[in-house]
Image (cartoon, grey):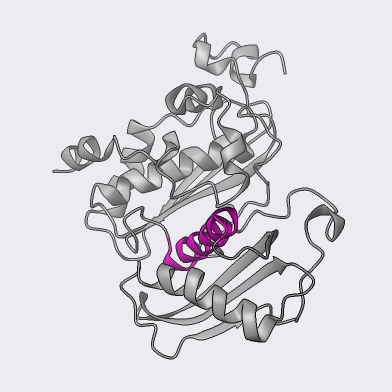
């Protein structure tokens, strides 16, 4: 687009109003005090498992593994708190001659699952472990599965612990709010939780195509707020700028950083700017 609606209608001369949202839609950001990176434990553990699976393959620890693989984790909650690991599922591509039950499963348990479980302070007694429950997994990657884009939206975000607006991230530049709006919503949610204003918090933001300012913004603290929820909403409007150009500038999104988001999720990784908690002290002071 040539200019955002606000600029074209003469309501603004702010340079940050020159860029309107590249499409309509809603985005969600989420943070919860379950891990040091303020992510839900199920998706955090699932990403650790897939990363460990890749590491042991690349290092030759399990030499017969091939590149394709995925994981899923089921955590038991009690009164909203994670208490026990219920099920761990790993599907791992392997060479043709490998026996799943006598070789693959014991190796994956010893070299992948057990080391990751030790990283989390959760009861894992009696955990159900499923390794390649369909049997052999010899053909993988694009030879086995090809199709439409945008099929990774849950594993890229919060593993189903928060809603999703439906727009994928990959393949989109930061003018597309499906990507930049979701990054900003995570940044805001994480800083609010890091500031101690809530233990669990969700931001929902929505845009109209061609407009710079969001058309709605909502905050849900799930009853975990430490200050008045209305004050948190006001603080979000006061302290953060959700216009696309402002997001791009604040999070420095016009850099070649996106290759690293292709695996292991977009959130909970300290190398990304939207994971910084550099506004937490400021937010804490604002409500004190």
- Residue 163 x, y percent position in the rendering: 56, 59
Q: Quadrant of the N terminus?
A: top right
- Residue 123 x, y percent position in the rendering: 34, 82
Q: Is residue 280 visible?
A: yes
Q: Is residue 215 visible?
A: no
* Residue at the image position 60 percent from the left and 80 percent from the top: 105
Residue 281 figure quarter: top left
Instruction: Judge by depth and name the residue closer to the eye, 90 or 286.
Output: 90
Question: Is 259 part of what is drawn in magenta?
Answer: no
From what the image shows, is residue 252 above or below residue 87?
above
| Residue range (magenta) | 40-60
Q: Is residue 8 left or right of residue 12?
A: right
Instruction: Judge by depth and name the residue closer to the eye, 42 or 54.
Output: 54
From what the image shows, is residue 3 above or below residue 171?
above
* Residue at the image position 68 percent from the left and 29 percent from the top: 22
Q: Is residue 138 left or right of residue 117?
A: right
**How many discs appear?**
0
Residue 228 figure quarter: bottom left
- Residue 278 x, y percent position in the rendering: 29, 35
Residue 85 figure quarter: bottom left
- Residue 213 x, y percent position in the rendering: 54, 29
* Residue at the image position 49 percent from the left and 11 percent from the top: 14
From what the image shows, is residue 176 above or below residue 64?
above
Q: Quadrant of the C terminus?
A: top left
């Amino acid at each position: 687009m040539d200019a955002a609606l606000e600029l074209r209608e003469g309501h603004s001369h702010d340079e940050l109003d020159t860029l309107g949202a590249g499409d309509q839609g809603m985005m969600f950001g989420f943070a919860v005090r379950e891990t040091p990176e303020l992510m839900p434990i199920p998706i955090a553990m699932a990403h650790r498992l897939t990363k460990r699976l890749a590491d042991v393959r690349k290092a030759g620890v399990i030499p017969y593994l091939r590149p394709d693989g995925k994981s899923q984790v089921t955590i038991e909650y009690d009164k909203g708190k994670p208490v026990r690991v219920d099920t761990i599922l790993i599907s791992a591509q392997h060479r043709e001659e490998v026996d799943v039950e006598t070789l693959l499963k014991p190796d994956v348990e010893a070299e992948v699952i057990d080391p990751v479980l030790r990283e989390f302070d959760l009861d894992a007694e009696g955990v159900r472990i499923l390794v390649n429950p369909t049997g052999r997994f010899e053909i993988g990657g694009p030879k086995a599965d090809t199709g439409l884009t945008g099929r990774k939206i849950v594993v890229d975000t919060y593993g189903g612990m928060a809603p999703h607006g439906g727009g994928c991230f990959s393949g989109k530049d930061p003018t597309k709010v499906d990507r930049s709006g979701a990054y900003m919503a995570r940044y805001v949610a994480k800083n609010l939780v890091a500031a101690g204003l809530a233990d669990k918090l969700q931001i929902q933001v929505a845009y109209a195509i061609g407009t710079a300012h969001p058309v709605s913004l909502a905050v849900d603290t799930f009853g975990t707020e430490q200050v008045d929820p209305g004050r948190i909403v006001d603080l979000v409007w006061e302290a953060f700028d959700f216009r696309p150009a402002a997001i791009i500038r604040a999070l420095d999104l016009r850099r070649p950083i996106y290759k690293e988001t292709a695996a292991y999720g977009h959130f909970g990784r300290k190398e990304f700017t939207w994971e910084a908690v550099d506004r937490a002290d400021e937010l804490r002071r604002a409500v004190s």
